[in-house]
Image (cartoon, rainbow, N blue to C red):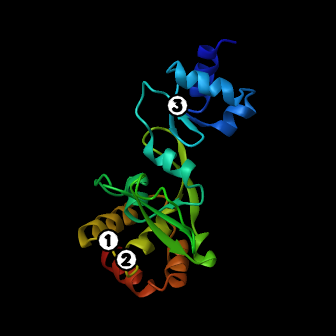
Amino acid sequence: MTLYNQAKVLLHKYNGTFTRRQAISEGIATPSLSRMVEQELIERVGPGIYADPMSFEDEFLIAQLRLSRGIFCKETALYLHNMTDRTPNFMEMTFPKGYKSNYFDELRIKPYRQIDALYGMGITTIETPYGNQVRVYDIERTLCDIIRPPHVAQDEVVRQAMQGYVQRPEKDFNRLMKYAKNLKVDAKIKTYMSVLG
């Protein structure tokens, strides 16, 4: 198979962005990837990450691939859940306590850190606007996070998200209250739900 065809297959299979590890699992060696980059069949967008040079980069997927322990949270999660009309200026991600990276500024990441007991609570996957799967906190966890000090979202954002949640057919009030209790925002959540419900 020619380099062109190999690149085409990889880009199609992985929706325009793939890792070196994925290429190797498909039987494509690292030198072949380098030649594909030289021939501009693919573009190297980060260490071990390649994309279609003719399409828009999925910055959510690239951030997830480069910062694999990160979970999209807060207003970025609201955006991915279609719960806000605001496009984020930067991406918010939560990491395990003590996690460090030199990529935060380059990728426009606002990092938050969480103890293990809270870090893993409510993780799910969601499709980005480009059709790729990334890890994000579920909507119930996100609602708790946006009202949790010290990084509380603006009132308008919170109100819009809470109203949107109440109108969602797939809401889970029991899960919301469980998370709210664990995150110590149960009184605030009860207030919002009683006013909107």
**Label of residue 66 in the image:** none
| Residue 153, numbered circle | 1
Front position in the image: 40 or 88: 40
Q: Report which quarter residue 9 is drawn in.
A: top right
Please tell me whether mark 3 sits on a helix, a strand or a loop: loop
Which image quarter is the N terminus in?
top right
Q: CA distance from mark 1 to mark 2?
A: 6 Å
What residue is at 59 percent from the left and 78 percent from the top?
Answer: 115
Q: Is residue 79 left or right of residue 101?
A: left
Q: Which residue is more in the foreground, 51 or 164?
A: 51
Image location of residue 66, percent across then percent down: 55, 50
Q: Nearer the viewer, mark 1 or mark 3?
A: 3
User: What amino acid type should be assigned to the residue bearing mark 1?
Assistant: Ala
Q: Residue at x 62, y 27 (%)?
A: 33
Q: Which residue is mark 3?
A: 16
Q: Is residue 113 left or right of residue 5?
A: left
Q: Locate residue 59, reporting x and y percent.
A: 44, 45
Q: Is residue 18 left or right of residue 73?
A: right
- CB atoms of marks 1 and 2 within 8 Å: yes
Q: Which residue is mark 2?
A: 147
Q: Position of residue 48 (x, y in %)?
A: 60, 40
Q: Amino acid at mark 3?
A: Gly
The mark that comes first in sequence, 1 or 2, is 2
Query: As displayed, is residue 80 above or below residue 130?
Result: below
Q: Nearer the viewer, mark 2 or mark 3?
A: 3
Q: Is residue 96 left or right of residue 186?
A: right
Q: Most extreme residue toward the top, as rendered?
A: 2
> In this view of the protein, which residue sits in the foreground, 8 or 166?
8
